Amino acid sequence: MNFKPGQYIRHAKYGCGTIVARDADRTTVDFDTAGMKLFVTSLAAFEAAEGVAPAKKTRSVRRRAKVVTQ
């Protein structure tokens, strides 16, 4: 099956994830629980998953105000 970037897939070991990038040699998948993984495209075993990918939490970065001394 020909998978495209943005498609939600299922892997036997890592569970469900979204294809981030894919070319003839490598496929990068961002899994819901396992994070980013890189696969050899010709050896990768995925199946289409039902539903849509859950929304990822973005990291919130708190910055401290810079103290100005005179």
Image (cartoon, helix red, strand yellow):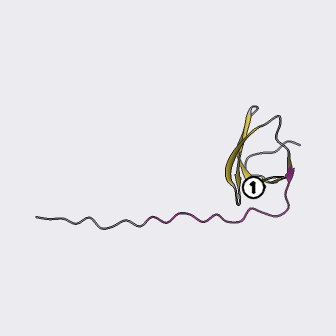
Which residues make up the magenta segment?
Answer: 47-61
Q: Position of 3 compared to 32: left or right?
A: right
Q: Quadrant of residue 8?
A: bottom right
Q: What's the residue type where badge 1 is placed?
A: Gly
Q: Residue at x 73, y 53 (%)?
A: 18
Q: Residue at x 69, y 46 (%)?
A: 37
> Percent position (x, y) of residue 49?
84, 58
Q: Residue at x 49, y 66 (%)?
A: 60
* Residue placed under numbered mark 1 in the picture: 17
Work out whether 63 lies above or below 11: below
Q: Position of 32 compared to 45: left or right?
A: left
> Percent position (x, y) of residue 25?
74, 32
- Quadrant of image for the C terminus: bottom left
Taking the magenta stretch, the answer to whether it contains residue 58 is: yes
- What is the number of callouts on the image? 1
Q: Residue at x 22, y 66 (%)?
A: 67
Q: Quadrant of residue 54?
A: bottom right
Crowd class of label 1 (few under 14; some 14 to 19; many from 20; radius 10 Å)? many
Work out whether 43 lies above or below 13: above
Decide whether the magenta segment is chiefly helix, strand or loop: loop
Residue that protrudes farthest toward the front in the picture: 13
> Percent position (x, y) of residue 15?
79, 57
> Percent position (x, y) of residue 19?
73, 49
Secondary structure at badge 1 equals: strand
Q: Position of 58 compared to 61: left or right?
A: right
Work out whether 70 lies above or below 11: below
- Quadrant of image for the N terminus: top right
